[in-house]
Image: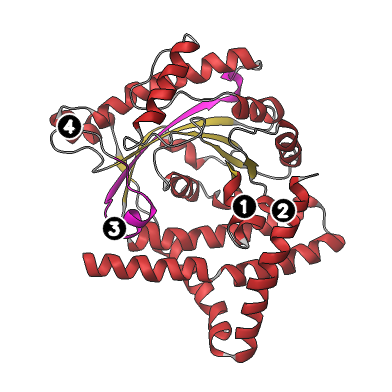
Amino acid sequence: MGVVGGFRYVFGSVMMIGVSPQYFGLWIVWRTLSLMVLPDWMYQWGDDKLYSMYQRLVLFFFETCARVEVVMYGDADALKKKETVLYLGNHQSTVDWLVGNMVSVRAGSIGHLRYVMKDTLQLIPLYGHYFYAHGCIYVKRGQFNQEKMIRSLTYLKNPKIPTWLIVFPEGTRYYPATPNVIKKSEQFARDNNLQVLKHHLAPKIRGTWLVVEHLHSKFDAVYDISVFYEGTVSDDGVRGNAPQLAEFLMGKCKRVHIHIRRIPMTEVPHTEDELKHWLHNLYIEKDELAENFFSTDKQLRDTVQQRLGGRVSPLNLWSTLSAFLFFSAISTPIICTSLGNSLYYHILVYGSLGSYIWLAVRSVC
């Protein structure tokens, strides 16, 4: 497992990162053509197709090759619907964003994923710029810029742009290795007369409220997603850190439990104060659910799938293998020809520089 996992980590990482110039080049071509003649929604349609292909490549390594078993609970049948969704997820690992892929690919909506994400991710070469163009929203911790977020949300109001917008209301990861973060969250709850949570950080309201305020009429439902990684709790009942990206890719997490609760938008408050209490109550319920997975009672943990009606949800091999074959095909001439090598280098260097310049200009506007 060590050798196989190590190879999978190295090969998968090299390919997922290494195809960024090819991906960015395809996107630039499509973006340039669409700017000439196409409306925003049609550009977004093509962009979502391209994004879907790349995220399926990610799942090829993280789910198909890692042989991760996905177990679904709750309102998993909601994934059969074609909906515009506000996805509220618990946050404990650098893998949490990838679980959004696992859920949305089973709904046929992986290309429509967009995230509210921390602004440091815009520093990723090429992808940092692309995520913004795809409709993701960057926010800066400690220096929240409401107006910039509203501008990004305005673009997503277009009814012809289907969206799954992923928000992690806790703002940062619940990580037992950083107890000061957990203590700070508990104190925040006490200071605001809110119930202290046992398995989550207290959810922050500002970003979630802006999303709800501006896109309430766009969304069909909230998908309240609770994720639990098998192996997080030791045999003696001590909760450890959830697996992170490298561990996950190396196959050290063999099963992911995903609980879905579909909440119609008619049940989501329209005012900030009401939403604050609604959201915290939602996390109280998530805390109660989490007790089944983090309980110190090993028997409760071992029988959780049977007790809560969990169902294994296999992923069709072709849905991810096709993406691997596609990127392998377009990478072959890049690797094997001098012209391809030169094009790759120029996109990587000048594309990255241009992206950073554009993002810098945008940050002051």
Asked if the residue at tag 1 contacts the one at tag 2, i.e. Cβ–Cβ closer than 8 Å, the answer is: yes
* Residue of label 1: 122
| Residue type of the residue flagged with mark 1 | Gln
Locate residue 217 relative to residue 55 in the image: left or right. Answer: right
* Residue of label 3: 251
Quarter of the image where one finds residue 138 = top right
Q: Residue at x 65, y 32 (%)?
A: 144
Circle nearer the viewer, 4 or 1: 1
Sequence-wise, which precedes: disc 2 or disc 1?
1
| Residue type of the residue flagged with mark 3 | Gly
Placement of the C terminus among the 4 image quadrants: top right
Circle nearer the viewer, 3 or 1: 1
Residue 76 image position (x, y, % from top left): 42, 37
| Label 3 secondary element | loop
* Magenta stretch, residue numbers: 241-268
* Residue of label 2: 359
- For label 4, the crowd category at 10 Å Cα-Cα, with few meaning under 14, some 14 to 19 and many 20 or more, is some
Q: Is residue 75 visible?
A: yes
- For label 1, the crowd category at 10 Å Cα-Cα, with few meaning under 14, some 14 to 19 and many 20 or more, is some
